[in-house]
Amino acid sequence: MVSDLGNRILEEQGQTAAALECGGTRLSAQAFRRGVEERHQRWSAAVQPGDTVLVFTGRAEAFWLDLVALWTLGAVAVPLSASLPSSHLETVLRRAQQPVPG
């Protein structure tokens, strides 16, 4: 699945076209694909389809690479801001542990 996504980006935009501009950083389609594939490979043994994974926002391009890599693994990514009140974070964490309806 990661190859299909990466190939589509490269075909549509070319190797050096910007695929992501975030927080002052510009990633080419090739760099974006490489970042997603590295994460995909690193996490493939630990993350299974349907797993819920919390992803902290506010990390510029790392957030987007993490998010797409988790999607390619079939995970349910839950974006989470560390700036939320602790009561809200606790609620999100509790709900994230519940099974996702299929």
Image (tube, helix red, strand yellow):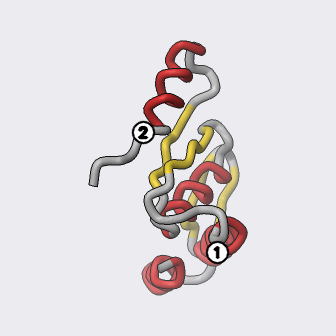
Residue 28 picture quarter? bottom right
**Is disc 1 placed on a helix, strand or loop?**
helix
**Left or right for 91, reference 27:** left
Residue shown at 59%/15% (left/top)? 86
Amino acid at circle 1: Glu
The answer to whether residue 28 is seen in the rendering is: no
Where does residue 48 sit, x and y in percent of width and height? 53, 64
Residue shown at 47%/65% (left/top)? 49
Q: Distance between the residues labelled 1 and 2?
A: 28 Å
Amino acid at circle 2: Gln
Q: Mark 2 points at which residue?
A: 98
Where does residue 32 sit, x and y in percent of width and height? 62, 69
Mark on residue 96?
none
In depth, the one of 15 and 36 nearer the eye is: 36
Q: Name the residue under label 1.
A: 37
In depth, the one of 39 and 29 nearer the eye is: 39
The answer to whether residue 46 is seen in the rendering is: yes
Relative to 62, does residue 89 appear above or below in the rendering? above
Where does residue 56 sit, x and y in percent of width and height? 62, 39
In depth, the one of 101 and 11 nearer the eye is: 101
Residue 67 picture quarter? bottom right
**Is disc 2 placed on a helix, strand or loop?**
loop
**Left or right for 44, reference 72:** right
